[in-house]
Image (tube, coloured by chain):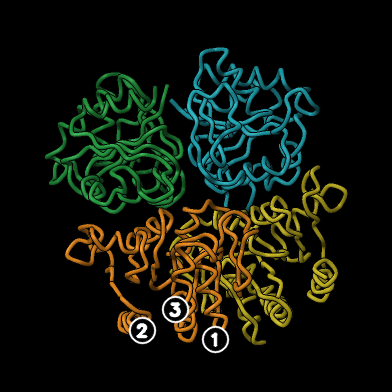
Chain colours: A orange, B yellow, C green, D cyan
Amino acid sequence: MKNIGVIGYSGNTESTPIREIAELCLKLGQELGKRYTVFTGGRNGVMELVSKGVKSVGGFCVGILPWEGEDANEFNDLVVKTGLDFQMRSFVLVKSVDAVVSIGGEIGTALEILASYANGKPVILLRGTGGWTDRIATVLIDGKYLDNRKLSEVYQAWSVDEVIDILDSILR
Amino acid sequence: MKNIGVIGYSGNTESTPIREIAELCLKLGQELGKRYTVFTGGRNGVMELVSKGVKSVGGFCVGILPWEGEDANEFNDLVVKTGLDFQMRSFVLVKSVDAVVSIGGEIGTALEILASYANGKPVILLRGTGGWTDRIATVLIDGKYLDNRKLSEVYQAWSVDEVIDILDSILR
Amino acid sequence: MKNIGVIGYSGNTESTPIREIAELCLKLGQELGKRYTVFTGGRNGVMELVSKGVKSVGGFCVGILPWEGEDANEFNDLVVKTGLDFQMRSFVLVKSVDAVVSIGGEIGTALEILASYANGKPVILLRGTGGWTDRIATVLIDGKYLDNRKLSEVYQAWSVDEVIDILDSILR
Amino acid sequence: MKNIGVIGYSGNTESTPIREIAELCLKLGQELGKRYTVFTGGRNGVMELVSKGVKSVGGFCVGILPWEGEDANEFNDLVVKTGLDFQMRSFVLVKSVDAVVSIGGEIGTALEILASYANGKPVILLRGTGGWTDRIATVLIDGKYLDNRKLSEVYQAWSVDEVIDILDSILR
């Protein structure tokens, strides 16, 4: 089974801007959970909502945690405690997956988008979710690269269904 | 389900000193696989044999790999590619488990025994398997510690059954 | 003495796009070398040219290398071999400095710009040098932030003199 | 100039067992500082005393710190903040030096002795200083190796003068 990483806003799931995309995260988790093993950073925010969706359909969630992992959400089937800081641990996450889906996100998500590309992993931006997921779309080279080395492609989806279609085509 | 790490000799499973302990590794994998999620370094040698045992009873194996993980054995259910070197990746392994079982082993295993203790994880030495598993037993403080801070305990087992009994008692 | 990190294009210093900014890199190295300890990634490209400039005025260069460091340039006074991959080692670099100057750059530089900001370090973009140094300037929030958390400020300079003026003011 | 790492007890320099070896640490720092760049973990205990000795003769000290480095001692000329935990940062230290001198020490020192050997770096045990420096001497293979791969040699010195003599001979 292929591994898909999901990255995005951390933070309280009841607060803006996460609560506005809560349903979308749950649905993404459900659709991914039926098809793939889902990797997240294992904590709160988008990570927690997507993992909740994955579990609601009987899928399998892996949380790649920084430090010792005390703040893992309850939906992880397996937790890896890296002992690394928030950003360095993101490299373990992106190296371990076949593709990455990005939702909203602040600087940590931006680093993960770039880290995915740098490690040759396709990134799918779930557009309309704000933050760096939408911002990075404005600086793509030739509409799909993050530098001139063309290490991987960045895709843009405007719905969960479109995310699944893109994953189907690139991971075939 | 609790996570158990298994550490030990890397190398060709057909060569000394690994082939002499192959049956033992398979049996350990079988008994652990019935009860726990088993983490290894994901590569050859003891890691491969134990994972093969785990899979033969329908258990679940996680391989925590160095670098990008091209040399993962075929028995891993899930592979985490840390991007770290052989030794630094061992810290991700020991931090992610509840206890560690050690079999034989050269310097990498020695580092993992010490890393387990330093991270507060109980270590069970499967005695009679040679290498650092037997060597470290000769320098224990009060028969069970690796320094004066008493961060965790080091146990000694002389059979797979004894390993399981010790795990049962300390992880209850 | 304060520590300044310089990031930018890696690659052959005789080839485009590095040879076009070679003089600028040398001058930046000279001006930084008179005032600060200069940290780079220790390898070729912008790192090498800036370090050459630093040494030409008797300054002090530290190279923070990935892996074991076989490819260090000849201008490092001190080399730190992190054993980490290219990108993870960049975090050791940005954490160790008081501010970062960015020149051109592909994905590795983009990651370093974001890592600097994420670690609360001011970043000065030497504009007109191409690559991610110019590209990131187009997505700044309020003209100076890389996300809504305002962890540090991103400054823009159009000359080496302006870089020095900004450093003088923010590190006073 | 060659780089020498010094490892050993952390902790309060006024308390047992560090105060009993304080003069020895200062003298070691003085003799190393005249000849080599000295790397330590940058914190308290043996690291602080050796660095104080280095500075008293005008030498150069590098501190390789875990996390963000808030607890660096005052004798470091240069501080590298790795963002890594205590033990993972030790690998950056040993990879960056040409040889390592060990004094006393608990589990962190034991890990550094083994990490040095695993990375092919000679280790000199300053015998009579207790802890793992003396303990590891009891399990050497052929009196000088830490496993059968013979990755580097472990030397034993009973005085600072003997440490310097050994370094002179192996780093010639």
Mark 2 or mark 1, earlier in chain = 1
Amino acid type at image mark 3: Leu
Q: Residue A157 at x, y = what percent?
A: 30, 75
Dot 2: element? helix
Q: Are marks 1 and 3 on the same chain?
A: yes
In the picture, the quarter occupied by the C terminus of chain C is top left
The image quarter containing residue B166 is bottom right
Q: Residue D170 at x, y = what percent?
A: 52, 31
Look at 22% across and 28% down and name the residue there: C162
Q: Nearer the viewer, residue C8 or D152?
A: C8
| Image vertical order of residue D115 relative to residue D29, above or below | below
The image quarter containing residue B7 is bottom right
Q: Residue B107 at x, y = what percent?
A: 62, 53
What chain does badge 2 belong to? A
Q: Residue furthest top?
A: D57
Look at 26% across and 49% down and name the residue there: C136
Report crowding for label 3: few under 14, some 14 to 19, many 20 or more residues within 10 A (C-alpha).
Answer: many
Asked if disc 2 and disc 1 are in contact, CB closer than 8 Å, the reply is: no
Residue occupied by mark 2: A161
Look at 19% across and 61% down and name the residue there: A141
Residue occupied by mark 1: A57
What chain does badge 1 belong to? A
Left or right of B123, for residue D86: left
Amino acid type at image mark 2: Asp
Asked if disc 3 and disc 2 are in contact, CB closer than 8 Å, the reply is: no
Label for residue A28?
A: 3
Q: Residue furthest right?
A: B142
Amino acid type at image mark 1: Val
Q: Nearer the viewer, residue B142 or A96?
A: A96
The image quarter containing residue A135 is bottom left
Look at 44% across and 40% down and name the residue there: C120
Mark 3 or mark 2, earlier in chain = 3
